[in-house]
Amino acid sequence: MAYDTNNIFAKILRGEIPCTKLYEDDLTLAFMDIMPQTDGHALVIPKEPATTLFELSDEAAAACMATVRRIGNAQKKGLGAEGIVLMQLNGPEAGQTVPHFHIHVIPGSIADLRKPHAAVMADRAHLLGLAEKITAALG
């Protein structure tokens, strides 16, 4: 499948659409999911254009995992999360809704994922408050 340069995450990377940024480096961006399944639900994306894991370079994949670890540790510290669920879907048949590789970093447990994926928009003020706690914990 050809990469769609007009997907929402590509637009976020180009600065055309805002996001609640948690962390950014040369290869990755982490931000709050605006339709979270739990409080503190974050997304980590590569800056490299790739739809699925299988199209992603080894360098970008490794960078994403390093950022996932950083965000997960900050969620544990800043939100008091005891567990972190990682979810990564490849292709629409697997439930992927945005055609840009991304990893969900979700504080809590699998039992906490009662809300359907990408179903309910978060309250902006609440989302910003959670983001502040996570970014403060990044140090």
Image: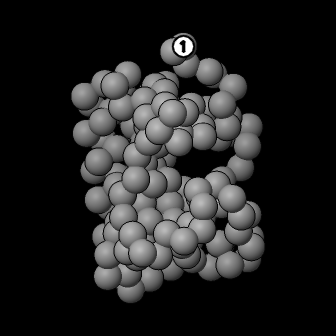
The number of numbered discs placed on residues in the rendered structure image is 1
Q: Secondary structure at mark 1?
A: loop
Residue most toward the bottom? 80
Where does residue 49 sit, x and y in percent of width and height? 49, 25
Residue 48 shown left or right of residue 118 in the figure: left
What residue is shown with label 1? 2
Q: Is residue 77 visible?
A: no
Vertical arrangement, residue 126 with respect to residue 102, above or below: below
Vertical arrangement, residue 99 with respect to residue 134, above or below: above
Vertical arrangement, residue 24 with respect to residue 59, above or below: below
Say how the picture is coloured: one colour
Q: Is residue 37 visible?
A: yes
Vertical arrangement, residue 100 with respect to residue 111, above or below: above
Residue most toward the front? 93
Question: Looking at numbered disc 1 in the image, what kind of residue is underneath it?
Answer: Ala
Residue drawn at (25%, 39%) of the image: 62
Residue drawn at (29%, 48%) of the image: 65
Residue 74 shown left or right of residue 69 in the figure: right
Where does residue 124 sit, x and y in percent of width and height? 74, 70
Residue drawn at (38%, 74%) of the image: 109
> Badge 1, how many Cα within 10 Å: few under 14, some, many 20+?
few
Residue drawn at (32%, 82%) of the image: 82
Residue 93 shown left or right of residue 119 in the figure: left
Where does residue 128 sit, x and y in percent of width and height? 65, 73
In which quadrant of the rendered view does residue 15 lie?
A: top right
Quadrant of the frame with the C terminus: bottom left
Where does residue 3 sit, x and y in percent of width and height? 55, 19
Between 125 and 35, the residue placed more toward the observer is: 35
Between 71 and 3, the residue placed more toward the observer is: 3
